[in-house]
Amino acid sequence: MNKLSLLAIAALIAAPAFADTTSDVVSENKENTQPESEFMSDERTEEGFITHYINNAIASGMQQADQQAEVEYGRKVTSYVSAPKFGGYFIGKYAATSQDGKHSGDGFTQRLVRFYVDGTILNDFAYRIQIQTNNASFHMKDFFVEWKKYAEFKVKIGQYKRAFGLENPMNPWDVGVGDYSQLTKKLTGHSDFIGAENTSNGGRDQGIQIQGDLFPAASDGHRFVHYQLMVSNGQGINTADANSQKDITGTIQIQPIKGLFVGAYGWTGNFTSGNVTVDRNRYLLFAKYDANDWSFRTEFAHSTGHKVSDLKTETDEFGNTNSYWTGTGRADAWYATVGIPCTPWLKTWLKYDAYRDNGQWNSNKSIYSVCPVINLHKNLMFQPQFNYVHENASKSSYTEFWLETYVRF
C-alpha cells in the first residue's frame, strides 16, 4: 500500500472527529424549535460528541415510526412531539492563590457536571430538565414547561432562573471569565449574601413567569422592548415555600439598535430560615453590546435587607428576651467586562469586579481579571485566568491563578 493510500485512509478515520455535525439532516429536523428571545442569554442545552449520536438515533427512530405507524407508549408518538434533545458537560478546575492561610489554593477540583434534556410538545410547549452534581452533591437544577406560541407573550412554570440579573441566566460557557461576578453570586441568589441555608441556588427559584418581546423594527426585525415578570416562593430550588408571602422579580429591557441592550431589574421579597425572616429588596441596572464578536457587559445592583446572622438575641437580668438587628442591612456590587476577539479560536476577556458586603467602602472586595478563552472545538474549551484581588476588610491583596477545562459530552 503506497503512502498516498495510507494518507487517504487516515483522513477518512479522522474526519468524523472534526466534522461539522450541524449539517446532519436528522439533527436539523429532530425537533420543532421555537425562536428564542434575543434579549435572554438563557442556558444553552447544546449536544456534545456523545449525545449527538443519541439524539440522532432517537430522531431517526421517531421519523421511521411516523412514516410507518403511530407507536403507543402512554401516548402516541407523532410529529406533534419533537425528538428530545440530550446534552451534558463538565467543568474541571485548578486553582492556586498567594492569599495567606489558603495553602496555595484548592488545587484540582470538580466545579460541576451537568446533564439535561429538552424538547417541545404540540409545537408550542417547550420543556427542560437539568440535573447537576458537584462532587458528592447531586441535585435538580431546572424543571419547567413554557408556552411559547407568541414572541410577545410566553408563560413558564416550574423551577428555573430568577428574572433578576443579566449575567445570572448565562451558561458557564458564555460568561467569558472563569466564574460569575460577585454581583451575580451574592445578589441574584447564586450563593446569596444573606448567609442562610439553601441559598446556593444558582440564581433559581420555583414559580410562574410571563415574558415577551415587543415592537419589531421594520429595518432588521430586532425587537425594541423585552419584559419579564416572575412570582416565586423566594426559598430557592427543591424547597417548598416557608411563609405565606411570594417574591416578585421582573425586568424591562430596551434594544434601541441591534446588539445594544439597556435596562433594569427589580426584586422584592423575603427569605425564611428557621424562625428568622429577612427582606430582599433589590434593583439592578445594566448595559451590554455585542458586535463582530466584540462583547461588552456591565451591571450595578443594590440590596436592602439584613443577613440572617444580623439578628441578635439577648436576655436581660429579669429573664426577658430582646432581639435586635446589627449591620447596615445594605449591600451593593458592580462589574464591567469586555471580550476582545483575537483569532477564530481565541477571545480574551478583561473584567473589573467589585462587591461591598455592607454597602460601605470598608467592606469592598475588588477583583481585576484577565482570561484568555481558548476554543479548540465546539465541545472543548480551556480558560486560564489571572486575578488580582484587593480586600478592604482585611487590608490585604493577593493573586489567583485558575485553569478551567470545559468538555461537552
Image: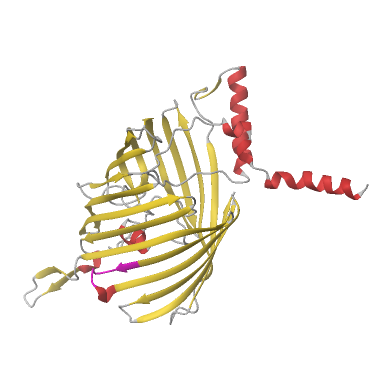
- Residues in magenta, as a range: 354-360
Give the side of residue 321 with respect to residue 110, left or right. Answer: left
Identify the residue at the far right of this view: 1
Identify the residue at the far left of this view: 318
Residue at x 54% of width, y 48% of height: 88
Q: Determine if the magenta segment contains residue 393.
A: no
Q: Position of residue 219 (x, y in %)?
A: 38, 34
Q: In this orientation, which residue lies closer to the viewer: 15 or 220?
A: 220
Give the side of residue 219 with respect to residue 58, left or right. Answer: left
Rendering quarter of residue 303:
bottom left
Identify the residue at the far top of this view: 69
Q: In this orientation, which residue lies closer to the viewer: 218 or 231?
A: 218
Q: Position of residue 374 (x, y in %)?
A: 57, 59
User: Could you tell me how many numbered marks the image carries?
Assistant: 0
Q: Where is residue 97 in the image (x, y as percent from the top left)?
A: 48, 76
Residue at x 93% of width, y 48% of height: 2
How is the model colour-coded?
Answer: secondary structure
Q: In this orientation, which residue lies closer to the viewer: 363 or 295?
A: 295
Q: Position of residue 246 (x, y in %)?
A: 22, 46
- Can see residue 403? yes
Is residue 229 positioned above or below 198 on the image?
Answer: above
Residue at x 35% of width, y 35% of height: 217
Rendering quarter of residue 5:
top right
- Can see residue 195? no
Give the side of residue 326 with respect to residue 125, left or right. Answer: left
Q: In this orientation, which residue lies closer to the viewer: 72 or 56?
A: 56
Is residue 185 positioned above or below 126 on the image?
Answer: below
Residue at x 55% of width, y 51% of height: 89
Is residue 390 positioned above or below 58 on the image?
Answer: below
